[in-house]
Amino acid sequence: MKSMEEMLQAAQQAAETIQKQMTEMQGKLDEIEVEGLAGGGLVKIRCSAKGRVLGVAIDDSLLVPADKGILEDLIAAAFNDARAKADAVSGAEMGKMQAGMGLPPGFKLPGM
C-alpha cells in the first residue's frame, strides 16, 4: 500500500503533466489557422484556433463609400464565422487531449 506522501507526489506529478499538456495545447491552438467568410467570400478573416486574428481580406468590389455599413456588417460576420470555427477546432483538440489522458468526455479541466 502506498503511503500518503507517495500518493501526494503522484498527484503532484499528474497535475504537472496536465499543466504541461495544457500549455502545449494552447501553443498548438495558436498555430492552427481557420478562415471565416462572409458575403460569399468577399470578406475573409483568418485567425488562429485560439482566436487571434491573423489577417483580413476585403474584395475590391466592396470598397464603395456608400456601402460602408454593409462592409462593416460583413467584417463582423466573417469574424464571427472564424470565431465559431476556432471554437470548434479548439474543442476538438481539447477532446483529443482529454481522451489521451483517460479523462471522461465533457470533463472540464480547471482554466478551460
Image: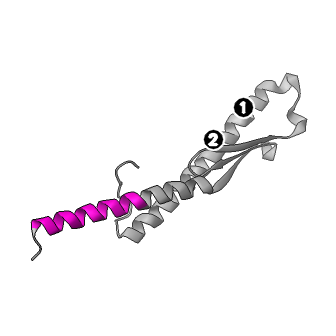
Corner quadrant of residue 72: top right
Q: Which label number is shown at residue 13? A: none
- Judging by the rendered image, the residue that carries numbered circle 1 is 73
Residue at 61% across, 51% down: 85
The three-letter code of the residue at mark 1 reads Asp
| Circle 2 SS class | helix
**Residue sitting at the far top:** 66
Residue at 35% across, 70% down: 102
- Judging by the rendered image, the residue that carries numbered circle 2 is 80
Residue at 80% across, 25% down: 68
Label 2 packing within 10 angstroms: few (<14), some (14-19), many (20+): some
The three-letter code of the residue at mark 2 reads Asn
Q: Please state the extent of the stretch shown in magenta in the rendering.
A: 4-20
50 up-or-down from 19: above or below:
above
**Residue sitting at the far bottom:** 1
Distance, label 1 to label 2, CA atoms, is 11 Å
